[in-house]
Image: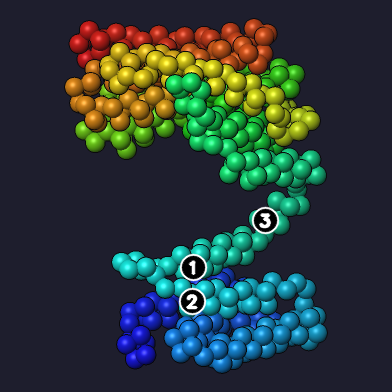
């Protein structure tokens, strides 16, 4: 028994047993007033009581200590509830509830034994995660209360629907489905459909929060996830808003392209340890940023800006399944074609995959091409060309996604003009690279 008590495991349990409670007590301490009866020390010692009770009962095989600890905890929590409700007539039971919770977190710490070579066990990590989560929930109480006050019933229902789609279907979708000799990425398709629903919901909330400027935030942050999905959602939003502000929507699509190349540049920076591909990709990044800055300057001087608020949030629902399913169908068709041509890792296969894959996700082409280059550095010219080609196509394909969502020509003309200008400049860069001039 003495050997067990003197191990480093006991020290970790003691420290961690105190910390998981003290972190929550820190937030309570910050709001301490005359009505508060527990702070950092009380919360930390209460969770430590739970850790010690479980640990000692376990190594002594005697439940008396655990029963004693649980009894003390029940008395302390009951005293807090009595003081809160009957002596101070306070409202809410948050403090007594989290005070009871820290005893359970401490018990998890005391019960768990880390595997050999690891500092923390699974239950200890779980206790730390719950402690941090509770700290965040309590710390952002005012922000959460404000969000609940302003959210509408329709938005709440939409958020619940989205959560159901993610939580219930996520574990049921297989990673791949065998279609003959091709393994179709079923989960990736499902993920992009969910992503589009999330992006659409985010579009709704951003525009509601930031009014007309929200559409720019959405284009930029939506493009970080998937620029094609962001453009589909933007165009559907434009149609629902009675086709107002075409120039602003087009600028937001440009920002989605900027976010797309920045994300791809980050992928290259992570995968390509030689930085050869990353240095090559800096030119397309610069081209897109410069042209988008010029567009933003001209947009601010445009006569296309009406007086008053442009977007009025007349959506029937914050997200709809139609655009998401349409995008999923397009993605599925293009991926099947891409997989057919990408069976070989040869240079030709990389370029063919880029020509096709760029219509769906340039990020996937950039990541796979960089990975192939790291395996076989002799394929540097083909990998570089594949990355640039995928970027060009990913810029030009925005015209297709806009056309599929809106057959009128006003927005399509602006997007086509911007896309062709950017695509032409990057294509010139590609030609110079292919000729060996760069």
Q: Mark 2 points at which residue?
A: 111
Q: Which of marks 3 and 2 is in front?
A: 2
Whether residue 266 appears in this view of the structure is yes
Nearest the viewer among 248 and 178 is 178
Query: In terms of image quadrants, where is residue 422?
Result: top left
Residue for point 62% across, 77% down:
99
Nearest the viewer among 166 and 274 is 166
Secondary structure beneath label 3: helix
Asked if residue 299 is positioned above or below residue 374 in the image, the reply reads above
Residue for point 54% across, 21% down:
332
Secondary structure beneath label 1: helix
Secondary structure beneath label 2: helix
Quarter placement of the C terminus = top left
* Residue 164 image position (x, y, % from top left): 69, 44
* Residue 159 image position (x, y, % from top left): 70, 43
Whether residue 426 appears in this view of the structure is no
Kindly check if marks 1 and 2 are in contact, taking CB atoms under 8 A apart as contact.
yes
Separation of residues labelled 3 and 2 (CA atoms):
34 Å
Q: Mark 3 points at which residue?
A: 144
Q: How crowded is mark 1: few (under 14 residues within 10 Å), some or many (20 or more)?
A: some
Kindly check if marks 3 and 2 are in contact, taking CB atoms under 8 A apart as contact.
no
């Amino acid at each position: 028994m003495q050997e067990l008590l003197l191990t480093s495991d006991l020290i970790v349990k003691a420290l961690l047993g105190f910390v998981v409670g003290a972190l929550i007590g820190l937030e309570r301490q910050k709001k301490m007033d005359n009505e508060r009866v527990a702070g950092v020390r009380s919360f930390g010692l209460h969770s430590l009581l739970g850790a010690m009770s479980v640990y000692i009962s376990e190594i002594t095989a005697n439940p008396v200590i655990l029963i004693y600890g649980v009894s003390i905890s029940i008395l302390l929590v009951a005293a807090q509830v009595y003081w809160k409700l009957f002596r101070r007539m306070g409202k809410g039971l948050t403090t007594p509830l989290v005070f009871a919770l820290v005893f359970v977190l401490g018990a998890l710490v005391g019960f768990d034994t880390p595997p050999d070579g690891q500092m923390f066990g699974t239950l200890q990590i779980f206790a730390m995660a719950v402690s941090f989560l509770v700290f965040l929930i309590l710390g952002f109480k005012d922000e959460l209360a404000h969000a609940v006050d302003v959210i509408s019933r329709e938005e709440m229902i939409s958020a619940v629907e989205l959560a159901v789609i993610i939580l219930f279907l996520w574990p049921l979708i297989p990673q791949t489905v065998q279609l003959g000799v091709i393994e179709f990425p079923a989960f990736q398709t499902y993920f992009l459909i969910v992503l589009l629903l999330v992006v659409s919901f985010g579009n709704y909330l951003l525009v509601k929060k930031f009014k007309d400027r929200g559409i720019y935030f959405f284009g930029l942050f939506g493009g970080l996830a998937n620029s094609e999905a962001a453009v589909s959602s933007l165009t559907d939003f434009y149609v629902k808003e009675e086709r107002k502000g075409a120039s602003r929507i087009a600028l937001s699509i440009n920002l989605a392209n900027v976010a797309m190349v920045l994300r791809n540049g980050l992928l290259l920076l992570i995968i390509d340890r030689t930085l050869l591909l990353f240095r090559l990709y800096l030119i397309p990044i610069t081209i897109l940023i410069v042209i988008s800055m010029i567009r933003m300057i001209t947009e601010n001087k445009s006569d296309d800006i009406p007086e008053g608020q442009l977007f009025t949030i007349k959506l029937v629902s914050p997200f709809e399944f139609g655009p998401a399913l349409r995008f999923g169908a397009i993605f599925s068709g293009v991926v099947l074609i891409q997989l057919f041509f990408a069976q070989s890792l040869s240079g030709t296969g990389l370029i063919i995959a880029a020509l096709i894959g760029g219509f769906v996700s340039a990020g996937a082409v950039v990541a796979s091409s960089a990975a192939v280059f790291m395996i076989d550095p002799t394929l540097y010219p083909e990998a570089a060309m594949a990355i640039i080609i995928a970027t060009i196509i990913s810029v030009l394909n925005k015209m297709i996604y806009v056309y599929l969502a809106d057959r009128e020509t006003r927005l399509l003309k602006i997007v086509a003009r911007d896309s062709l200008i950017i695509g032409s400049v990057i294509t010139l860069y590609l030609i110079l690279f292919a000729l060996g001039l760069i």
